[in-house]
Amino acid sequence: MCELAGVSRASFYRNWEKREPTAAEMALRDAIQLAATARRYYGYRRITKHIQRQGFVVGAKKVRRLMREDNLLAIRKRKFVVTTESDHTFRIHPNLAQHLELTDINQLWVADITYVRLQEEFVYLAVVLDAYSRRVIGWALGRTLESSLTLDALDKAMTSRQPKPGLVHHSDRGSQYASADYVYRLESRGAVLSMSRPGRPWENGKCESFIKTLKQEELDARPYRSLEELNEHVTEFIEQIYNQVRLHSALAYRSPVEFENQNVRDESAPVWMPATLSFLRHEEIYSDGQAH
């Protein structure tokens, strides 16, 4: 076409970029802007999935280009704050979570604690997630790091889920999770404890990922004056946004509630079973096939 018209390709593309956008292109750009401003820390992949659900036929590369042009690409802040007190005499449990093959809810729960800065004090948040669906099933806010905080979060999870014996509970080695009261509460329900190794926060990566999301998308967005105000906003974020509508790449861009609803067992399926332990075989460790 350029040869027939006697126009260079470079001139054609310059003029093409200057043309007036069509109604469909304007609608797409508007949808991207609305999605990106409402979800400040969504990257272009999640924005793509979000607007595809609205009926737009568009690829991730185009969404990324439009977001870059409109200065809408998410900015990530990378930081890690150590809050674990592992200098205690309680029993330490081995890491079983890394060897589990999850096929259902209530097979593996993960738990962690983080701090939240208010205008005049620091408070602490304990959470419990179902590792299969990434759903937050228990949480508690408090002014101290006493074991009562983690017990409150665990009790909420127990009440809402009613797990059967065989559940694995994974956490770091903090004294709150290794305390006698916490261990007894789990073992009395037939649960098995699992703990990360020292200095390896990635071994509890699903909980760490949720805490990062909570801070980026809710806690860092506004200052909080009181514990009561914080509790109201955290509850709203967890119940109405994170669990219900936030898209997770690990769940094929579905929310935890949507993922659970689409993966629930029917009545003809086998009864609930604990997760299967899967260890590497000799051939998987030593690929040369030789004994070591």
Image (spheres, rainbow, N blue to C red):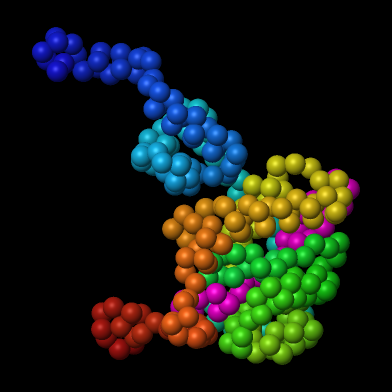
- The furthest residue to the front: 267
Q: Residue placed at 81% from the left, 46% from the top?
A: 224
The N terminus sits in image quarter: top left
Position of residue 240 measured from the top left corner of the image (x, y, whole percent): 66, 54
The C terminus sits in image quarter: bottom left
- The furthest residue to the top: 6
Q: Which residue range is magenta in the image?
A: 99-125
287 is higher (above) or lower (below) than 66: below
On whether residue 103 falls in the magenta region, the answer is yes
202 is higher (above) or lower (below) than 158: above
Position of residue 162 measured from the top left corner of the image (x, y, whole percent): 66, 80
Q: Nearer the viewer, residue 105 or 99?
A: 105
Position of residue 213 measured from the top left corner of the image (x, y, whole percent): 62, 53
Q: Residue placed at 38% from the left, 35% from the top?
A: 62
266 on left or right of 235: left
On whether residue 119 falls in the magenta region, the answer is yes
72 is higher (above) or lower (below) than 90: above
- The furthest residue to the right: 120
Would you say residue 130 is visible in this rendering? yes
